[in-house]
Every structure is written in structure tokens, then in C-alpha cells.
């Protein structure tokens, strides 16, 4: 069961700007246990994660796990902000199955392949 995730970044300030823009949130970096991190927005009870800049983390658009971030009621609203924030859309919104919802893929400002999921 997932309880935390970390998205590797090369430039924490650029990444905070990118994720802040696509999720309409104020995301600020902080120092924690020798790492530079920024927490992504979430609500009580949500699985959350953050951005992390450290030499042992390497962003990738083709290797490693694929994280599905919550796209809210309709992921298209988030996806529409990706390119303006410095990312690239890899796969437009498409239905997975009626009972599962929709997904889309994008490359973030740091070169990570990421996904969005929503029911609408």
C-alpha cells in the first residue's frame, strides 16, 4: 500500500513553479534531513508526496515507476496547464474504462514522465 512518494528534480525552484502552476497551489521548498524537498498539496487522508532534490535522485522520462497524480474532478483542467508551465504532454486524456476513469501522461519540468488520473 502506497503511503508516500518522491519525485526527483534537478531544480527544486523550477519544479515548485511547474507543479504550483498545474495544480494552482503554492509549493515552497524546504530543507529536511539533508534533502531539499517540497510537499505537494493534499487533503487529510490522502496519500501524498513531494519533490526532492538530492544527488541520489535522478529524474527520468523512460525509467522507474510511473506515478499517477490526482487530476481532481476532470484531469483535463490540470493537463491544460502542463505546457504553459514548461512541461510536455505525451498522451492526451483518454478513458481507461468507464468504471476506472481517465488518464493522461506528461513530462514535467524536470524530465520525469508522470501521469494524471480522474473519474471525469
Image (tube, grey):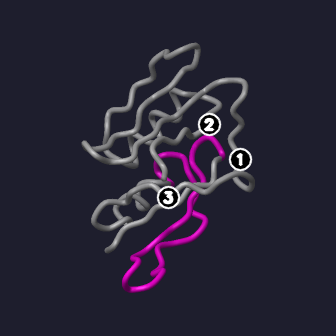
Question: Circle 1 — which element?
Answer: loop
Circles 1 and 2: CB distance less than 8 Å?
Answer: yes
Q: Quadrant of the C terminus?
A: bottom left
Q: Is residue 60 above or below residue 93?
A: above
- Graded by Cα atoms within 10 Å as few (under 14), some (14 to 19) or many (20 or more), the crowding at tag 3 reads some
Instruction: Look at the image and give the residue range highlighted in magenta.
Output: 83-111
Q: Is residue 68 magenta?
A: no
Q: Which residue is mark 1?
A: 60
Q: Which residue is mark 2?
A: 8
Q: Is residue 106 magenta?
A: yes
Q: Position of residue 88 (x, y in %)?
A: 58, 56
Q: Looking at the image, which is closer to me, 56 or 95?
A: 56
At 31% from the left and 60% from the top, the residue drawn is 72
Q: Earlier in the sequence, mark 1 or mark 3?
A: 1
Instruction: Give residue 91's quadrant in the image.
Output: bottom right
Q: Position of residue 9 (x, y in %)?
A: 61, 34
At 56% from the left and 30% from the top, the residue drawn is 52
Measured in 3D between alpha carbons, the distance from the residue under mark 3 to the one under mark 2, in whole angstroms, is: 15 Å
State the residue lying farthest toward the left. 44
Q: Which residue is mark 3?
A: 68
State the residue lying farthest toward the bottom. 98
- Count of residue discs: 3
Measured in 3D between alpha carbons, the distance from the residue under mark 1 to the one under mark 2, in whole angstroms, is: 8 Å
Question: Circle 3 — which element?
Answer: strand
At 45% from the left and 18% from the top, the residue drawn is 30
Q: Earlier in the sequence, mark 3 or mark 2?
A: 2
Measured in 3D between alpha carbons, the distance from the residue under mark 1 to the one under mark 3, in whole angstroms, is: 15 Å
107 with respect to 116 (left or right): right
Q: Looking at the image, which is closer to me, 48 or 94?
A: 48
Q: Position of residue 73 (x, y in %)?
A: 27, 65
Amino acid at each position: 500500500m502506497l503511503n508516500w512518494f518522491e519525485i526527483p528534480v534537478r531544480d527544486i525552484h523550477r519544479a515548485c513553479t511547474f507543479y504550483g502552476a498545474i495544480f494552482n497551489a503554492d509549493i515552497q521548498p524546504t530543507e529536511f534531513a539533508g534533502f531539499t524537498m517540497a510537499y505537494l498539496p493534499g487533503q487529510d487522508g490522502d496519500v501524498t508526496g513531494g519533490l526532492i532534490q538530492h544527488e541520489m535522485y535522478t529524474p527520468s522520462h523512460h525509467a522507474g515507476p510511473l506515478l499517477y497524480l490526482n487530476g481532481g474532478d476532470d484531469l483535463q483542467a490540470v493537463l491544460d496547464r502542463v505546457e504553459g508551465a514548461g512541461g510536455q504532454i505525451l498522451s492526451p486524456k483518454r478513458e481507461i474504462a468507464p468504471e476506472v476513469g481517465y488518464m493522461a501522461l506528461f513530462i514535467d519540468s524536470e524530465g520525469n514522465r508522470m501521469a494524471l488520473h480522474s473519474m471525469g
